[in-house]
Image: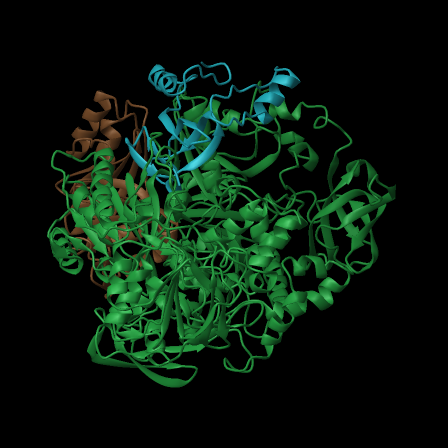
Amino acid sequence: MSTRLANYGRLINRAKAVNFTFNDKVLNGFEGDTLAASLLANDQMLIGRSFKYHRPRGVVASGGEEPNALINLGVEGHFEPNARATTTETFSGLTAASQNHFPSLEFDIGAINSKLARFLPAGFYYKMFIHPRSFWKHIYEPIIRKSAGLGKAPKSRDADKYEHYYHFCEVMIVGGGIAGLQAAKSAAATGVRVLLVEQTPHWGGRAPVDGVMIDGMAAEDWVAQTLAELAARDNVVMRNRTQGSGVYDHGYALAYERIADHTPGDGRPRHRLWRVRCKQIVTATGGIERPLSFAGNDIPGVMLAGAVRDYVLNYGVSPGDRTVVVTNNDDAYRTALTLKQAGLEVPVILDARAEGGGDLMGEAITAGIRVELGRGIAQVLGGKRVTGLQICSQAGEGAVLEEIGCDVVAMSGGWSPVVHLWSHCGGKLNWDADQAMFRPDPNQPPLSADGEGFVRVAGLANGHLRSAAIIADASVQGAAAAKAAGGNTKRVVLAKAEDFEERPLSPVWLMPQGASYKLRSKAWLDFQNDVKVTDVQLAAQEGFESVEHAKRYTTLGMATDQGKLSNINGLAVLSKSLNAEIPDVGTTTFRPPYTPISMASLAGEARGELFQPIRKTPMHDWHDSHFAEWEPVGGWRRTYAYVRPGETVDQAVQREVTNTREKLGLLDASTLGKIVVKGPDAGKFLDMMYTNMMSNLKLGRCRYGLMCSENGFLSDDGVVARIDDQTWLCHTTSGGADRIHAQMEEWLQTEWWDWNVWVVNITEQLAQVAVVGPNARKVLEKLGGVNVSADALPFMAWADEKLGGISCRVYRISFSGELSYEIAIPANRGLEFWEMLVEAGAEFDAMPYGTECLHIMRAEKGFIMIGDETDGTVIPQDLGLSWAVSKKKDDFLGKRAQQRSFMDNDNRWQLVGLETLDGSVLEDGAYAIASGKNANGQTNTEGRVTSTYYSPTLRKGIAMGLVFHGPERMGDILSFTRIGAAPVKAKIVSPVFYDPEGKKPNV
Amino acid sequence: MSDREFQGYVNVTQDTGQTMFTLRATLSSTKIKAAIKLATGVAVPKRGSCHVVGGCALAWMSPDELLVMAPIAQAEKLRVSLDVALSEEHVLLEDVSDARAKFILSGTNVREVLAKLAPMDTHPEKFPVGSFNRTRFAQVAGAVFLEQDDLVSVICFRSVQDYVYALFCDAATHGSEVLVRE
Amino acid sequence: MLILNCPYCGCDKDETELAAGGEAHLKRFGPGSSDQDFEEYLFERTNPKGLHFERWRCAFGCGKWFHAARCTATLEVFGTYKAQTLEPPKVIKDVITTKRPGWSWRNFS
């Protein structure tokens, strides 16, 4: 059993006990524990079930590489699935639950899959679920969906706060082990700004556990001294609990700070995403120990040798009383010695190397530990916990030489450098055959904006396994990075570490090397996704020779740990099956983030009220308190209709239309784009921007204008007013203001930069109100101060005036077909002016109206709407707007395009009005059915509906549409599609349904 | 619009007492520069900065655009003097007082709060007092003027002022200190 | 996430502050041009692996358009320059010649 030791535990505070629950059981741990350490201290080795076969899973590792110890962490708003117990700090009140089992962790029905394993080989899903086709949707998918996923999906909104932080520095160092610290020291000495991040709460990495000596000091003391030195410098920022998660182009990196995971509810943000821009990055990310592939290597109690040592020394936790160490290298001997020193039993060290190890092996033998050379494990015994193992010769096929009782197996297949961050942005790898590892190829680094490498790797991550080499490498890499980032490297900071003499490892990809199928089919590569040695061999046999294909076919390395333990072993098995060398098979590409990071940290502040900016007009709050039903328009919120209590939205719209037509309506038109164009060449410029002539517009007058793209398509429309000799004011659509302003700037900056024209977007400077209806003039006259008579201010004229004491500009324009004024006032007085109008208008039955009422009124008049009648494929000539396309001008945007044969063509669909024979409302977007079928066997069409409404004025459905030869076919009856119903007949009519003579606005 | 105020580890207040003009003009012209100086009493700033003299501020928006700021009481006088001084030049002066919102961040950690929302290097050597930078705050455009080491003006569009105010309040919340430069 | 130096602001801008605008140095063809010239102007774009000249706008900054010469394969930036020019300035061409000897792009070399 696993338990807490009386001694050891350099990271825990025994004076501070903490209570937490696991599967509703109250357990205790110490401050400084990881949850995995706390669970082991409570003899909770079994922590979860594997994905496919539901096999019992226990803690394997002690850090971010852990594939097994995944838990549902927290409750409700603080719930998170698939949290790694090895990187979760234990705190008082922590709630954890095991995953992927039913009904309980101890007894899980899904474990039946394990018995069916031979029917569930690699690629099972692909082979099984493809036939019959029809089964997928109703049978297979629902079942698979039910069994998918390890943890539970969160049900509550995330209750925590998250944020981003943009950080700039010259050198970023990832990893706070001795290599990272030394690299930071070395870089900081040059005076450049250094950011040093470490993913765990502790600095120093593995060195204190491994008993490393630096500059004559124990690693722990050297780390403390170095930290103090770094902290004293004002050019160094250090963050623990912060993982360098991803490296991207041009020195961009993401660091993931877990501020309050261990102190929930203390008012701090839970996570902070550091968006770092630096010139150089040094990754000192250390290494990950590889498991060995032997039968039963997934039984709880089989752990990485380094992790066993970590639990004893860092947390004072013994994973078990009797630990067999199995290794192909010298490092695992440290675990045996540590255990022995802690008074625990090490029955035997199985060293797969016939020649054994160096100094450390000597120490083990001296300590009285039995060492067996050239031996391996044939099979581990046990179910939910290791009970013993069978020893065999590594060279053989697994014949059992001896059976031995134990409750822990500490395995070590050697160390792999953590090259992930080097690889994220394109750094290439070399295979180092002597050390059996991929290590960064310094000649093929990720490149930055200057074409030079911007990532360097230091220490173990760079393939240096011994502390002397690690610390020397770190000095060099830190200084080199600083130099490349502009630092002054006259003074180089050095340090020296001492090492034991070690013998090289001997690669062991399968144990024993000739293992029988029976053993191989129990030798796990990927513990979380249940991928065995035989699965990878099957993939190779079935032709999945590319490592990327084999990965997807077997799901090797596709679990939440992304193959941190399984990658190299799986690759080696694959290459052996293909009879190829490991570097020829290559490795899968490492993608950021290094370990999963919270979605909420990526969102940062962008949630709730801050999810998306909403543009508000000066009268927004008034609308809100007057029953506005909102509609999003170009980032704005506009009132769709003011829905009074007891009304439906439709009823409100009808009421607004009728009232405006008969009495008086008020519209908040502040969102309309307003762009001032001024200069000696402004007229010439506007003649290019608009299809019609703007240079000859008279002072004091307005003109409706169209804008096309260079491709000829209609892109925006609006009223232009001539302000003075050199100044025009262009109104754009609400959604088009920023786009048209940007487009004007673009042409002025990049094509006609010698033209003297200035453009300013004053959209938000002005509030604009449309006063519409037969009573419009009356209410303005009541406000007083302006002569709005037909003579003083005729249709399509404007004037600068004062209304009710507020300076304003009054435009006599109409988008409704009624007598109408649009009044622009400074935005700060918009609300005041609006309220004044509402009050003064009361006696004239003034009512505010929304965008739907506006749409209906313009449709009744046959006015087009950008985005309804246009969709990026429609030209002005399609819409009966040829009158607004100048024939006199030599050039304007879109002119050349409109001369192309398929544009200058009578066969294009053209705008008409449509009325159903039964008075019903046509469906939006409905097609007019033509005879016959097209080449694809689809029914031919000859037109489509672009706008369709119920007209409360005419008391029937009205529509506009584009129809083949439409204007020549007045009175023709067409059939229009309906979804889920028979087609409906409609007659082609004039698009002007209301006041065709245009008398109403001109009074 | 009433002035809002938020007390966090950096304080956020709205300043509605400013008038603002956009001035489009060729700023490389010495004649135009002299005219602007004459009208405002402020020398045209170099790129990336803002000059303030006697309450009137000129901020560099682009090679051909200045943002002119002054207390509202000076608005009319300022407009007239600019109109007069630049009457012979090809320029465009527009009142944008109502199109903008201005917030003041104050406190020792103003740089840090800015760095939560804007992708800009706020280190004192890279962003010294007097700097003016156009950037984005989370999802919207804005400008930052570092008036003093512990005082920042933030300018954004009027329509998104509620969003920007909420952004800075959120970033300045007690407990969310980053404390990079303790 | 690229960093490009805005030649107007005179400082580095993050990609999130910029807007990409496609290929640079297009020649506008208007009324009177042949169908082929017009088609090429509107639609034909080079999409090289390697050296490319692009338009960018300092969208959240000064609002100005500028050009960037960069390598689409390695993302190396050879330089940025103001948009009011018909061809890349000599200083940019010289940098490219140093880094990519023998280069050519459309009719530039």
Q: Classify residue A614 as left or right of residue A179.
A: right
Q: Does A990 sit above or below residue A900?
A: below
Which of the 4 image quadrants contains residue A44?
bottom left
Q: Does A817 sit above or below residue A919?
A: above
Q: Nearer the viewer, residue A399 or A960?
A: A399
Q: At which x and y percent is residue A352?
A: 41, 57
Instruction: Tell me if I can see residue B173 in this picture.
Output: no
Q: Classify residue B155 as left or right of residue B123.
A: right
Placement of the N terminus of chain A among the 4 image quadrants: bottom left
Residue at the spot 32% in from the left edge and 76% down from the top edge: A38
Query: Which coloring applies here?
Result: by chain
Q: At which x and y percent is residue A686?
A: 49, 27
Q: Does A696 sit above or below residue A559?
A: above
Q: Which chain is cyan?
A: C
Instruction: Tell me if I can see residue C77 in this picture.
Output: yes
Q: Nearer the viewer, residue C70 or A236?
A: A236
Q: Does A450 sit above or below residue A173?
A: above
Q: At which x and y percent is residue A872?
A: 62, 38
Residue at the spot 60% in from the left edge and 21% down from the top edge: C40
Residue at the spot 55% in from the left edge and 41% down from the top edge: A580
Q: Nearer the viewer, residue A97 or A542?
A: A542
What is the display colour for chain B? Answer: brown
Given the current orientation, which residue lies at the most extreme bottom position?
A25
Given the current orientation, which residue lies at the most extreme right position?
A932
Q: Classify residue A158 as left or right of residue B34.
A: right
What is the display colour for chain A? Answer: green
